[in-house]
Image (spheres, helix red, strand yellow):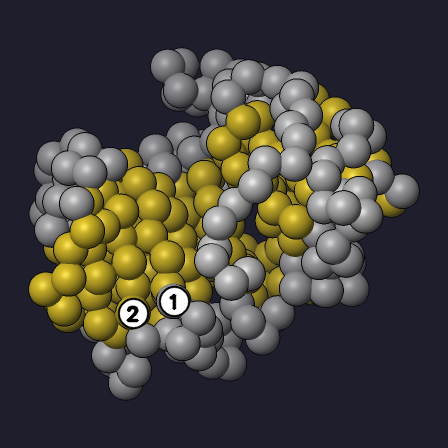
Amino acid sequence: RATGRLSLLNQQTSGGAHPCHVCVAPSGDHVLAANYTSGSLACYPIEADGSLGAMTCLVQHEGSSVNPRRQAGPHAHSINPDPAGRFFFAADLGLDKILVYRLESGHLVPNNPPSAALAPGSGPRHFAFHPAGRFAYVINELASTVTAFRYDADRGRLDLLQTLSTLPEGFDGQSTTAEVQVHPSGNFLYGSNRGHDSIAIFRIHPETGRLTARGHASTQGKMPRNFAIDPTGRFLLAANQDTDNVVVMRIDQETGTLQSTGQHLK
């Protein structure tokens, strides 16, 4: 903690091809991973020393959707817990679904209802909860859209509210989305566009969870694969894959708009 230095403890097989996302259960006792290419989910216990125990379950998704190049089979792109840690949500790009699970004794058990469906060809990628716990959002890679849900925390159920484009009206270039984040205040939502090379900005209605588009900010680089909001909510850091740079933007706390700070990390 004094230096920030990391020391390797151990590693475990992901049980599938191209693991792309991990999360820690809010209980602090398990790690879950999503395998993109094979479309599966894995779970591991966290040992007393912080190392990963042997895999306790591997869940294989099945099915396909309408895009023959990208959705010929399942592609689990992320897995996220709800704020209470009762349910886990796996966005599967290949199935156009958010699959819902409970974690019981180290095993992922399908919930009832087992999933929430997106429009065919959406390609759900990453998923984020509103800090109030009543709403959730998924960014759809293939359609360049973001979908808002009302969340029933007792049942682990997602009810679709709306779907909006992450791209400006009239844009006709090639672009896909990547990351989605809710501001710590719960007032704003952000999503990254790879191709348009921007962060899409939305205001969140505090009572309904619905979104209103509030424009875009350039990421000052190419292919913003990921971004993060700092814990204070003052800054957004965008990582551009193809130009190898991280750009720091200041978040306006009243409007949610983003302004360049001039800070770049190559």
Mark 2 Cα-neighbour bin, 10 Å: few <14, some 14–19, many ≥20: some
What residue is shown at x 73% (from left), y 36% (from top)? 52
Q: Which mark is residue 230?
A: 1
Q: Is residue 104 left or right of residue 258?
A: right
Label pair 1/2, CB-CB below 8 angstroms: yes
What residue is shown at x 64% (from left), y 24% (from top)? 14
On the question of residue 193 being in view, the answer is no
Q: Is residue 20 left or right of residue 175?
A: right
Q: Which of 111 and 78 lies nearest the eye of the viewer?
A: 78
Q: Secondary structure at mark 1?
A: loop
- Residue 76, placed above or below residue 181: above
Residue extending farthest to the front is 2
Q: Position of residue 263 (x, y in %)?
A: 15, 62
Position of the N terminus by quadrant: bottom right
Q: Which of 9 and 95 lies nearest the eye of the viewer?
A: 9
Q: Which mark is residue 235?
A: 2
**Rendered image quadrant of residue 159:** bottom right
